[in-house]
Amino acid sequence: MSAPLLVAEDLGKVYRAYRAEWQRVLGWLGAPVRAQSEHWALRHVSFRVAPGEALGIVGQNGAGKSTLLKLVTGTARANEGRVAVAGRVSAILELGMGFDPELSGRDNCRHAAGLMGHHGGEIEAMLPAVEAFAEVGDYFDQPVRTYSSGMNMRIAFAIATAVRPDLLIVDEALSVGDAYFQHKSFARIREFREQGTALLIVSHDRSAVQQLCDRALLLEDGRLVKDGAVEEVMDLYNALIAARENSTVTVTRADDGRARTVSGTGEATVEELALCDVGGQPVEFVNVGDDVELRVGVRVLAPLPRLVLGYMIKDRLGQAVYGTNTHHTGQALGPQVAGSRLDFRIRFPMNLGPGTYSVSTALVSSDTHLERNYEWRDLALVFTVANLDKPMFVGTAWVPPRIETPAA
């Protein structure tokens, strides 16, 4: 096993407030000055990252994600613990961070490259490649103040990745800009990873974390809640977001070892869930293209003002394949009394590619689980799709074409 590229041990960062600035200075000098108040933005956080590994960092605002990245990059100093990085680090912590709005993109790139440790002729040699990758056209020689946020991201990413780093750190920047450049950026990141670059990425975009990362960290109130498989961490993160007063979050293990997360107030619950064939028989294996019916039995345990049922089909990596709910279909139910049983039937063709999939269910009051979440249940059901009688194809969707060919 190769040596870790990044080691963080028992990291802690505290921000203290003093009654007077001279007290802060005395504190820096080691004098025993009592702070008026203190806030630990991060505490007891430990993890390691190997060369070529991609680690996602998720958590709600104020969880300590940006503080952690500042400690890793050295722009902030830890009060406790240590962090060690072996090799060149490139970071995009804020779009255009350090850019002079009055200078052109080209001149800002020269300045940024200098701060990254590059010199004279080396900088001039890399600028054509930066300009080509950023694709901002004539704007490359215009003042940065005329740039959109998407153009800022193009320049920042292009210069940060002009030379392959040993560790690339990205903080939400890739969520800005057009889809074309996002795909282009992800392709470069994957190429770097194949060459041994490690990735540290902070993002609220579940799909980006799942596509790019091998594992993830979940931070909550400056503490490390979970370090593990991306799907499990994202499911727990989703549950914590949905948690409200009197809500609970429980995690159990499915038969295949994956974590099954359930959260909500418990005012309603899915007590029966089955995927059935056209004859109404429960099935675990489904042929590509077959018609199926998802049967959901819901028990109402407390009076509800409104009830919405949602479901989501995910692939084996936990990425969403398809999801909707009865709010969006115009079929939300009005007030419900405690003790009632509601049976839903959802029919659709299994137009998915071969593979293993899971179903998550949600019982909520509106179009989202963030307002009033009665129950959110991940990995509620697992099924397998097999290609028994269709022409060979690859991918996660069955979209049969009609191809016209020229005459022989």
Image: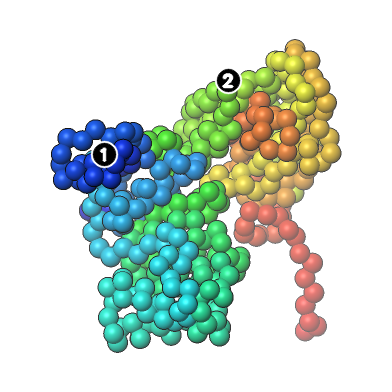
Using the image as rendered, state which of residue 39 and residue 284 is in the foreground.
39
Please tell me which residue is depicted at 30% across the width and 52% down the height of the picture. Answer: 76
Residue 51: x %, y % from top left: 30, 57
Using the image as rendered, state which of residue 205 and residue 64 is in the foreground.
64
In the image, 59: left or right of 326? left
- SS type, badge 2: loop
Please tell me which residue is depicted at 31% across the width and 63% down the height of the picture. Answer: 89
Please tell me which residue is depicted at 82% across the width and 41% down the height of the picture. Answer: 329
Residue 360: x %, y % from top left: 63, 35
- SS type, badge 1: strand
Residue at the extreme left: 30
- Disc 1 versus disc 2: distance between alpha carbons? 32 Å
Task: Mark 2: give few (<14), some (14-19) or many (20+) Cα within 10 Å.
Answer: few
Q: Is residue 297 above or below residue 89?
A: above
Q: Amino acid at mark 2?
A: Asn
Q: In this rendering, does residue 348 appear at all?
A: yes
Task: Mark 1: give few (<14), some (14-19) or many (20+) Cα within 10 Å.
Answer: some
Image quarter in which the C terminus is found:
bottom right
Q: Which residue is mark 2?
A: 246
Residue 245: x %, y % from top left: 57, 23
Q: Amino acid at mark 1?
A: Asp
Please tell me which residue is depicted at 68% across the width and 50% down the height of the picture. Answer: 352
Determine which quarter of the picture holds residue 197.
Answer: bottom left
In the image, 316: left or right of 386? left
Residue 10: give its label: 1
Determine which quarter of the picture holds residue 189.
Answer: bottom left
